[in-house]
Image (cartoon, rainbow, N blue to C red):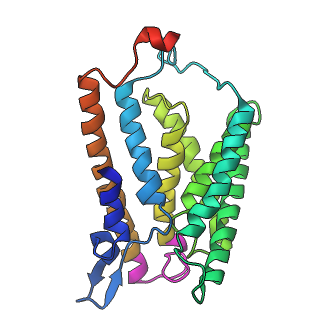
Amino acid sequence: VVYPIISHWVWSPDGWLAKGFSIDNGTITSGFHDFAGSGVVHATGGIASFVGAALLGPRLYRFDSETGKPQSMPGHSVPHVALGAFILYFTFLAFNGGSQMSISNPGDGLALAIVMVNTILACSCGGTAGLIISWLTSPHWSFLETVNGSLAGTVAICSGCNVVYPWGACIIGAIGAGAYSLLSRLVLRLGVDDPASSIAVHYGGGVVGVLSVAFFDRSRGILLRWDRRAAWTWRCKSWDCWSSRAWSGGLSAAVFGLLHWLGLLRASEEFEIR
């Protein structure tokens, strides 16, 4: 119920966000652009993950019972994390490239080329930014932070991978990694346990991706075109962030809240310990 409604708003020709909004009696129209789903897919899933994790509650012993500070619960296999990340990187190329929906029409080759290049650059710059951030904020270099930073960068570029310059993709990827780093710490401060960092990666990267198009779009980005249409594009992006997240978060709260009330959301303490 959550995803089909939002995807209709953005990707259907009849969707209200796809149609956009007019200025000056219809002389300028600015529709919402989300090529491969930074907002429709990732930010939508990220906010649903936050609601679900908040209602589910943290794992046993994740937070100190007296101080409330998070306790380290490292994963069991870093090589498996690396393998999973590699699979995701590979499938993102198909995910973003496939959003072109065709490869045999005139112009498809050039369109797919820029999509692939931008996806790889954002992923690489996101990973580099994640590595540097981990070095600046902890006493050691973190491979896991590098992986999550690269994933956040790849998520961030989904929205505008077909309309930004390669240098813009590099900046977007790095900002996506920064958003992941900040949001992952904020989630812990709120007492929410997110073992796979899904909230920070997908919501942080997704929101960065949605808003970045308003700044880096080759034809109407604020950094490249200082005009009313560029400002209207930013406004349209902001409306999507609020409306789509309200729909996703509200319905998720209803579903997870009902499961929690019925006692069906979480396994027993004995099962978790075992």
Answer yes or no: is residue 224 visible: yes
Residue 14: percent from the left, percent from the top? 28, 75
- Please name the residue shown 73% across and 45% down the image: 132
Q: Nearer the viewer, residue 246 or 272?
A: 272
Towards the viewer: 110 or 218: 110
Who's the residue at 50% across and 48% down the image? 202
Residue 226 is a magenta residue: yes
Specify whether 120 is left or right of 21.
right
Residue positioned 53% across, 35% down in the render: 185
Total labels: the figure holds 0
Relative to 187, residue 233 above or below: below
Q: Position of residue 170 (x, y in %)?
A: 67, 64
Q: Residue at x 47, y 71 (%)?
A: 214
From the viewer's side, name the closer residue of 195 and 219: 195
Q: Give how far across and how far down residue 87 sits, in percent.
A: 67, 49
Query: Which residues fall within the magenta stretch?
Result: 215-231
Main SS class of the magenta portion in the image:
loop
Residue 83 occupies which quadrant of the picture? top right
Q: Quick one: 151 or 24, which is closer to the camera?
A: 151
Residue 267 is a magenta residue: no
| Drawn side of residue 96 relative to residue 60, left or right | right
